[in-house]
Image (spheres, rainbow, N blue to C red):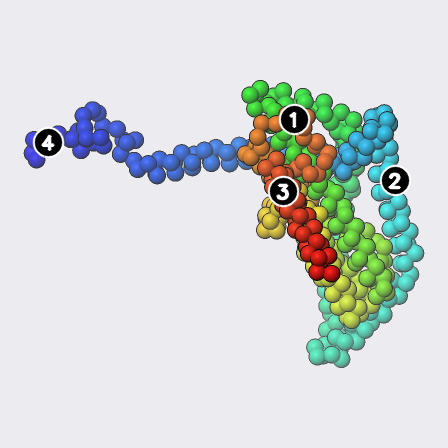
């Protein structure tokens, strides 16, 4: 034992200089390799996020333009198939969109102006009843206590008048920035619709030639998932707005049309948006119509949310963009932290595009990019998933045919 050398204890039995890497267990080496690669990817994603945040005033309008282009691109493609020149098709699509937005805004503004006198009288009556309840109800608050709370609130507002003035100036600056970003988004949208394929071909030039076709297919599937997402979101938002709007109109809540328009806009943020805007409708019902009306509106809101989560979302989004509700909520939360309301609006579409693109790169066979139609929602899923869905659909159709045949034989 005393005559044995240190090299005899090395892995492999033997001779040679010491090798520290060989002494490290294989599992630990794999964990280290995965860890530094993960940190490198995380650093890359963080750098991209930092650049986008630094250029948010440009990145946000471009993102919104891409989202809207996914809504209008199928219309432009259909007009082109009807022998309409592409430039004219783009103009028609944008004019239709602006006309729809302008019509909704005009309807909302006129409805609000017409309903203000009625709303004012209802709010006055409701505040009087709330005041009476606070004094004669279980709280038994005196008139002096209520007056003191009101005086404190007024003094707080008056004491922060300078701060409120500064916020008003800041709001005017924000409105100017928003208008500038809206013009940039409109300008970008025009070029996305008119020369989107050329822009995508230019972007692909920066991809290595060996994987260019694969990245092209992944990009097309990602945009197809965006088309599917936007279509489904618009349909869900319309159903939410119509159902809740009709419900609060039947209950007799004032400003039913503006509230329905607000719910339509909020529904573009999945799960959270419709709930938040619906809560405003409940609050308006409480102030204008009382407690019973607010409970009825809340029940309508809960029923519509159940319809959305159990019927509309799985039926409209489930076949093309399969996103777990937890992934949706986490994406919205991250979007809110990073970029507020706009981040929450763009978070789920970005997640859907990334999911479809990564799924295509991992599972798609070698395909000719021309075989993938980016404007067709069914192209969002990789080819194996499409084939599995087609075979499953054929099996269900065969089972239905067999069931019908058995019924006929029994008859």
Q: Residue 4 has which mark?
A: 4
In what element is the residue under mark 2? helix
In what element is the residue under mark 1? helix
The CA distance from mark 4 to mark 3 is 68 Å
Foreground tag (4 vs 2): 4
Reply above or below: 151 against 87. Answer: below
Q: Answer yes or no: is residue 401 visible.
A: yes
The CA distance from mark 1 to mark 2 is 35 Å
Q: Residue 99 has which mark?
A: 2
Determine the residue located farthest toward the left in the rendered image.
2
Q: In the visual, does 278 lie left or right of 34?
A: right
Q: Answer yes or no: is residue 150 visible.
A: no
Foreground tag (4 vs 3): 3
Foreground tag (1 vs 4): 1
Q: Position of residue 124 (x, y in %)?
A: 85, 67
Reply above or below: 170 against 110. Answer: above
The CA distance from mark 1 to mark 4 is 65 Å
Residue under pointer 1: 369
The CA distance from mark 4 to mark 2 is 91 Å
In what element is the residue under mark 3? helix
Q: In which quarter of the image is the N terminus?
A: top left
The CA distance from mark 3 to mark 1 is 23 Å
Q: Residue 391 has which mark?
A: 3
Q: Where is residue 39 in the image (x, y as percent from the top left)?
A: 47, 36
Dot 4 alpha-carbon crowd within 10 angstroms: few under 14, some 14 to 19, many 20 or more: few
Q: Position of residue 368 (x, y in %)?
A: 64, 25
Foreground tag (2 vs 3): 3
């Amino acid at each position: 034992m005393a005559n044995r050398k240190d090299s005899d204890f090395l892995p492999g039995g033997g001779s040679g200089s010491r090798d520290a890497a060989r002494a490290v267990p294989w599992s630990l080496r794999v964990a280290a390799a995965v860890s530094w690669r993960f940190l490198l990817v995380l650093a890359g994603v963080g750098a991209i996020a930092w650049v986008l945040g630094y250029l948010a005033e440009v990145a946000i309008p471009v993102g919104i333009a891409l989202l809207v282009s996914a809504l209008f691109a199928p219309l432009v493609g259909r007009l082109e198939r009807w022998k309409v020149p592409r430039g004219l098709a783009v103009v028609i699509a944008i004019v239709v969109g602006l006309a729809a937005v302008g019509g909704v805004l005009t309807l909302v503004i006129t409805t609000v102006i017409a309903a203000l006198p009625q709303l004012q009288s209802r709010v006055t009556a409701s505040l009087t009843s709330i005041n009476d309840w606070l004094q004669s109800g279980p709280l038994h608050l005196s008139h002096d206590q209520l007056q003191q709370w009101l005086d404190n609130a007024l003094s707080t507002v008056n004491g922060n008048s300078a701060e409120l003035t500064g916020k008003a100036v800041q709001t005017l600056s924000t409105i100017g920035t928003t208008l500038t970003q809206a013009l940039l988004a409109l300008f970008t949208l025009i070029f996305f619709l008119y020369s989107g394929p050329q822009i995508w071909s230019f972007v692909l030039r920066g991809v290595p030639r060996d994987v260019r076709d694969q990245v092209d297919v992944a990009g097309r599937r990602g945009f197809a998932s965006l088309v599917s997402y936007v279509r489904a979101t618009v349909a869900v938002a319309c159903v939410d707005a119509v159902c809740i709007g009709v419900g609060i109109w039947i209950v007799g809540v004032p400003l039913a049309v503006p509230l329905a328009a607000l719910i339509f806009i909020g529904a573009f943020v999945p799960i959270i948006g419709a709930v938040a805007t619906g809560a405003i409708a409940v609050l308006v019902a409480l102030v204008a119509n009382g407690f019973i009306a607010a409970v009825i509106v809340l029940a309508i809101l809960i029923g519509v949310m159940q319809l959305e989560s159990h019927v509309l979302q799985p039926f409209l989004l489930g076949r093309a963009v399969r996103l777990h509700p937890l992934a949706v909520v986490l994406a919205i939360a991250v979007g809110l932290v990073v970029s507020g309301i706009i981040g929450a609006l763009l978070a789920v579409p970005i997640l859907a595009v990334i999911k479809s693109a990564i799924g295509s790169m991992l599972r798609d066979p070698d395909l000719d990019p021309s075989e993938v139609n980016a404007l067709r929602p069914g192209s969002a899923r990789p080819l194996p998933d499409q084939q599995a869905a087609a075979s499953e659909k054929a099996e269900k159709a065969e089972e239905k045919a067999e069931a019908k045949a058995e019924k006929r034989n029994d008859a």
